[in-house]
Amino acid sequence: MESVLHHTKNTGVLIASDCNARSTLWHDKLTNTRGRILEEFITSNQLYILNEESCNTTFRNRLGTSNIDLIIINPQLLNSITGWVISDQESASDHSIIKNAIKPGIAKWHAVNPSQIQYRTNKSLAKFQRTILQVLRKKFKINHSTT
């Protein structure tokens, strides 16, 4: 993720993620360890969370509901987001459809920048980065020695 952010440094980046991380920062009922780690990653990379409070949740199944799906952007895209909504349209999944619009030059958005989070530690950020790399290596069948 950091490589992607570095590579796209002067361009708008939107990350739509099923992160399986819970945080009250993105309007979930609780904050778990994954949520704290993701909060730290977002803060340390100067990213913004677009999720708004809603009566709908981003995830629901027979065990319950939560907000574990995020839309994250970098500052270059901040003034181009014109909307964010959890759709009530059927998705054929236990994840909800999240809709937003990107229009250059139109600033109609107020996003949360979690710069005051107290959980920042290099150890937990390093753990999050290792986990992301492991998942990407497995998903894309990348041999450890080739990265």
Image (tube, helix red, strand yellow):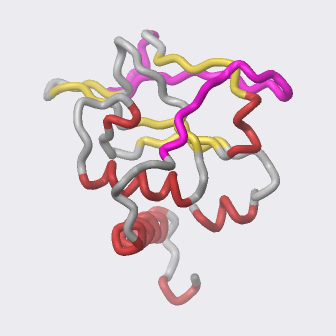
43 lies above or below 133 = above
Residue positioned 66% across, 59% down in the render: 5
**Percent x, y for residue 117?**
40, 50
Q: Is residue 63 left or right of residue 98?
A: left
Residue sitting at x 26%, y 43%? 31
Q: Main secondary structure of the magenta part?
A: loop
Q: Position of residue 140 (x, y in %)?
A: 52, 65
Q: Position of residue 21 (x, y in %)?
A: 33, 46
Whether the magenta-drawn stretch holds residue 52 is answered as no
Left or right of 82 in this view: 58 = left
Location of residue 105 (image quadrant): top right
Q: Residue furthest right?
A: 105
Q: Which residues are magenta?
A: 89-114
Relative to 28, does residue 42 appear above or below in the rendering?
A: below
Instruction: Classify the position of the C terminus by image quarter.
Output: bottom right
| Quarter of the image that includes the N terminus | bottom right
Q: Position of residue 122 (x, y in %)?
A: 41, 73
Residue at (76, 29) in percent of width and height? 80
Image-based side of 49 in relation to 32, left or right: right
Residue depicted at x 51% and y 52%: 42
